Every structure is written in C-alpha cells, then in structure tokens.
Amino acid sequence: MDDFSVHKGELYCEEVPVARLAKAYGTPLYIYSQNTVLSHFRKIQSAFSELDPLICYSVKANSNLSILRLLARQGAGLDIVSQGELVRGQAVGVPYGKMVYAGVGKTEVEITAALRAGILMFNVESEPEARLINRVAGRCRKKARVAFRINPDVDARTHKYITTGKKENKFGLSISLAMDLFRQSRRLRNLEPVGIHMHIGSQITSATPYIQAIQRLKKMIADLRQQGFEIKYFNLGGGLGIIYDEERPQTAVEFARAVIPLIRPLNCRLILEPGRFIVGNAGILVTRVQYLKRGYLKTFAIVDAGMNDLIRPSLYHAYHRILPVSRRSRGKTVLTDIVGPICESGDFLGKDRHIPQLEPGDLLAVRSAGAYAMAMASNYNSRPRPAEVMVAGGRARVIRRRETINEMLEPELAALSKT
Ligand code: LLP
C-alpha cells in the first residue's frame, strides 16, 4: 500500500527513520516515498494496460518539480490548469503533446501560451471559452484541439466541495449544450474537436458513478460519430479515492475491471487524470509538539504545523491519521486535539484523537499528506512554507528547501523600496 512502516516503535519512510529527517531538516516537514509514488503510478498503468491509456498526472495534487520529473520519466503526461503548471511541465521535460488543459477560467494569456507550446488538447468547459480559444488559435494561425468537458449529472458521493459532475456544479457542459457546441465548432474553424472529457469529483471510492457517467456519454459519442465528428479521445478524468481512515476504495484493478468493458467499445484512446491516487499516500507531514495544554474538556497538543501547511482538515473536515513518530511505550491513550499555532479555531489537524500521552518536543506524523497538502499550503499568519524531502530506499534528498522569511516578504519589500 505504501512505504511508511513502524519498526521497533520508530516510523520509517522506506529505509530512513522519519525522526532522523525531522532532526536534519526541521519541522514542519513533508516527506515523500519515491517508491510509493512509482508503485501507485504503475498500479494504474498495469490495471489499464490493455487499453494503453495516456496517464496525465493531475499536477494540482502535488506539483513539486521532482515529483513531476519522476512521473515524466515513467512516461506520464500531465493534466494542467494554469500557465504555472504548463511551465512546471516544461521545466521537467514533459512533452507538450502529453498535456491536457482543464479549468473553467482559462485566460487569453494562458490559452495563447498553451497553444503556442502545442499541448495535446484543451478540455473546454463553456461556450465563451470555446469562442475565445477559436479566436486565439486564429491569431496564432493554429488549429486548437479541443475536448468538451461534460457534466454528466451524477452523484460521486464525496465531499460537496470536491464533487464536480452534478447539475449544480460550475464544471463542464450539459450533454445537449456540448452537442450544440460540437455542431457550432464546424463554424469555429480554428477548433478541432477530438474528444470528450469528464471528471466527476475527487476521493471517489466506488466505480458506480463512473459507470453511470460513461453510460450517459456512450450515446452521445455514437450520435456525434453519426453526425460526422471524429471522437478520438475519451478522457475519464481522475478522482480515484484512497484510504485515509476506514474507507474501502476500489483498487485500481477493480476499477479497471468495472469500466474497461464500457470504455473498450467506445473505440477511443483513453486518457486518465489521476492525482490523489498516485501521491496521496506517498507523503506525510511531520510536526513537533510545542506545548500541551489542558482545556476544559480535553487536552490540546499544540504543534508547529497549522492550517496554512495542511488545510484539508479545516476546509473539508478531512480525516488524516496522526501517529507518534517514536513510540516510547504502549501506555494509555489520551483524548487529544492536535491543533496548530494559527489564530483560528478552525486550525486543527485532528480532533478527538485517542493517542498516547505526548510530551513537548515529540514528533507526530500526519499520514496521507502527499496530495492537496503542500500544494495548498499558504503563508497565512506570515508563516514560511515547509520543506519537502524525497526518500528513495536508504537515501533522502530535499526537493524543496524551506521557504525563508525573506523570500516570503521579498515582493513587498521590493515595493517598499520604490516609495
Ligand atoms: N482532473 C481534473 C479536471 C481535476 O479537476 C482534478 C482534481 C483531477 C483530475 C484529479 O483528481 P484526483 O485524482 O486527485 O481526485 N483539494 C481537494 C481535491 C480537489 C480536486 C480538484 N480536482 C482535496 O484536498 O481533497
């Protein structure tokens, strides 16, 4: 499952004791297992191998350049949503022909950059966006390959903030509007419609909503072909759930077994956009206990990582397992809230946890912190963002050094010097 394990009470990432890394690089610290990233990528690859899909890793899940390069070397493409992500892909040598570009708010500047680069396709989310891409392509004297993102109106049964394929969501187009856009695209001469895209949400633990969605799109693809459109690509999006707590998500193999029989007859090149599945359980956030404080009802362990470093618990009430990095004894557990130093009651990493009695200076590991963790970190409360370390076997290297206070202030200091 992943390469974090406890030996003689000590947490290891692959062959390296986590405590040693915390000592060497300080806390809060993100630590990733290279082997876990690779093995999860390969799980998807092999589960779908009979269809030879293009796996476009979703950069937003964890955009560290070293992680992108690692995946690029395995042949991964990228699912991008900004010019920044385009440049990240470029920096690690991902071929533009393996990049797909989604998002409801692509700007003219971003469209121009992606088009000039020659990405595989835009996943178009609205009619005005289709028109803008057409205009920009005309100006650049290029043909823009596009897929239309369909909102199939299915319930992915996940947190409401990460559901994207229901009627009330801002994403994608209804089937009828998309059909209309395909027809209009005959007049939008600089567009080349090449496929259909869907992405119904994130942390989805069963194949059922995907099956419902594909069934809704099957007829659409047949109708489009009848009208003379060549549908070369079918992009199933991302969204595969992982184990944070007690979830029992489908495995990659189970998922593939459930959807391949529906996808094969579509006769399209399959694109997948996994993010969390690849990196989610490949990372932990290590934090040090600063104070223990007795509250009215329970104990607070005040740690040196806060909602600015990992916002998922605050934003989605997401559950992340938290365990001591070094277990001193198997003593009794204490009901504890693990909270950060930020001046908000929403600043917590875990609530009502039964964990062994802690002491100031103890290290805690917040599990499943490889996806949407460092990628969503901010400087709130003027806190520099953590460092990131990658472990491979018995070796560890810094893949992003800790931000300094000076770096954080620099854009503002530059402005001060001008007045
Ligand atoms: N494709 C598209 C178009 C997406 O918008 C996303 C994620 C993915 C693929 C990858 O989804 P994944 O396989 O990672 O589930 N911050 C939230 C998750 C937001 C997901 C946004 N879109 C969280 O921490 O749970």
Image (cartoon, helix red, strand yellow):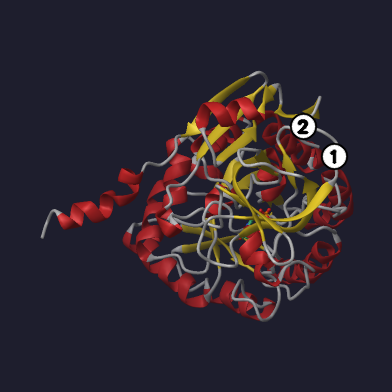
| Residue labelled with disc 1 | 331
Asked if the residue at tag 2 contacts the one at tag 1, i.e. Cβ–Cβ closer than 8 Å, the answer is yes
**Residue 276 visible, this angle:** yes
| Residue labelled with disc 2 | 328
The tag on residue 300 is none
Depth check, front residue: 245 or 17: 17
Depth check, front residue: 203 or 323: 323
Asked whether, in this view, residue 100 is left or right of residue 392, the answer is left
How many other residues sit within 10 Å of disc 2, few (<14), some (14-19) or many (≥20)? few
User: Which type of secondary structure does the marked residue at label 1 adopt?
Assistant: loop
Which image quadrant shows ligand 1?
bottom right
**Position of residue 137 measured from the top left corner of the image (x, y, whole percent):** 39, 61
Q: Which of the image's four quarters has the N terminus? A: top right
**Position of residue 288 measured from the top left corner of the image (x, y, whole percent):** 60, 41
Depth check, front residue: 118 or 374: 374
Q: Quadrant of residue 389?
A: top right
User: Which type of secondary structure does the marked residue at label 2 adopt?
Assistant: loop
Instruction: Check disc 2 and give the amino acid type.
Output: Arg
**Position of residue 256 measured from the top left corner of the image (x, y, whole percent):** 84, 48
Vertical comparison of 14 with 102: above or below: above
Q: Which residue is drawn at 58% across and 24% down?
A: 396
How many other residues sit within 10 Å of disc 1, few (<14), some (14-19) or many (≥20)? few
Vertical comparison of 174 with 99: above or below: below
